[in-house]
């Protein structure tokens, strides 16, 4: 991996590790059309310019993927026995995911693939040179972060679906309640569910194709899948679910620290709230 270059400007100007770094112009336009009144353009101007610039580059990669691999990806059959690692954030799901990924029988999504889901098949050769926009450690803890480490598939789906995901509040924290319907989709309309389902299935097909075919079981980990086990069982009746847990007091403290102190300030394009300010704690 190439050396990481520090361009972290801090505060509202930071663009490193941004979860929309791999969005395309069409996906970005859909998100802007739906949320344009909720974005603080002046405050987050550097981030918005960065995302737009990256969207233009990603569109080139997406076109290349569609032209070179589109038909093959659409025809790709999924292994019908995926393994889902479940659990509340900060309970050890990442560690287990990393360990299981060492088994060559599994196919998993890596950081580059979830970060650039629309064009990773044709642009994977660029991965070692993109240290400019990624830290060597995760922003919420000291775990190593590299382009080839296992990563959460929901990061990709959030971009492909233009925000039909519980991860979208990383960008629109004050609108967090509006995205809760994307956990299990029971209160979501048919169009929103179709956006998530089609994005999820398309991404899994790309991962399966990149792994060489359906002979490998998909190894998937996103904490939000814990809320949609019923839905996933309908989609994959032969799936295996591995649930990780720890003492709730310890896990909840670590989760609040991760969410309130680090993530909302790192990624938002809509004024984030303070746990102390909102709840008086």
Image (cartoon, grey):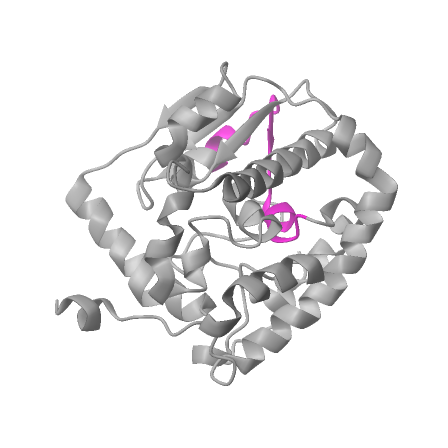
Q: Position of residue 270 (x, y in %)?
A: 43, 72
Residue depicted at 69% across the width and 64% down the height: 55
Residue depicted at 61% across the width and 41% down the height: 199
Q: Nearer the viewer, residue 75 or 261?
A: 75
> For the view shown, which residue lies furthest in the top direction?
238
Q: Nearer the viewer, residue 143 or 193?
A: 193
Is residue 151 one of those drawn in magenta? no
Q: Please tell me whether residue 131 is drawn above or below residue 123 in the rendered image.
A: below
Q: Is residue 165 visible?
A: yes
Q: Please tell me whether residue 37 is drawn above or below residue 136 in the rendered image.
A: below
Q: Nearer the viewer, residue 166 or 69?
A: 166
Q: Which residues are magenta?
A: 98-117
Q: Position of residue 4 (x, y in %)?
A: 60, 66
> For the view shown, which residue lies furthest in the left direction?
281
Residue depicted at 49% across the width and 37% down the height: 98
Q: For this view, does 165 lie left or right of residue 105?
A: left
Q: Position of residue 228 (x, y in %)?
A: 39, 32
Q: Which quadrant would residue 174 be assigned to in this image?
A: bottom left
Is residue 100 one of those drawn in magenta? yes
Residue depicted at 46% across the width and 42% down the height: 189
Q: Position of residue 168 (x, y in %)?
A: 46, 56
Q: Which quadrant would residue 3 be assigned to in this image?
A: bottom right
């Amino acid at each position: 991996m190439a050396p990481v270059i520090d361009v972290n400007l801090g505060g509202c100007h930071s663009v490193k590790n941004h979860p929309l770094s791999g969005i395309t112009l069409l996906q970005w336009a859909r998100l802007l059309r739906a949320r344009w009144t909720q974005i603080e353009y002046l405050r987050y101007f550097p981030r918005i310019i960065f995302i737009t610039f990256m969207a233009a580059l990603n569109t080139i990669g997406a076109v290349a993927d569609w032209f070179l691999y589109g038909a093959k990806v659409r025809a790709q059959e999924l292994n019908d026995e995926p393994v889902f690692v479940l659990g509340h954030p900060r309970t050890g799901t990442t560690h287990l995911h990393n360990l299981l990924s060492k088994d060559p029988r599994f196919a998993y999504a890596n950081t580059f693939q979830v970060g650039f889901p629309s064009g990773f098949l044709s642009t994977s050769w660029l991965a070692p040179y993109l240290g400019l926009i990624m830290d060597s450690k995760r922003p919420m803890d000291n775990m190593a972060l590299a382009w080839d480490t296992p990563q959460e598939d929901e990061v990709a789906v959030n971009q492909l679906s233009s925000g039909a995901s519980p991860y979208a509040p990383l960008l629109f924290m004050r609108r967090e309640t509006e995205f809760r319907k994307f956990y299990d989709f029971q209160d979501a309309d048919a169009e929103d569910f179709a956006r998530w389902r089609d994005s999820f299935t398309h991404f899994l097909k790309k991962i399966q194709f990149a792994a060489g075919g359906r002979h490998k079981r998909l190894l998937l980990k996103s904490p939000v899948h814990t809320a949609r086990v019923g839905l996933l069982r309908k989609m994959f009746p032969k799936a295996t679910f591995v649930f990780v847990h720890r003492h709730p007091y310890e896990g909840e403290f670590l989760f609040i620290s991760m969410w309130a102190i680090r993530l909302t300030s790192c990624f938002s394009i809509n004024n984030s709230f303070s746990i102390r300010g909102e709840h008086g704690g």
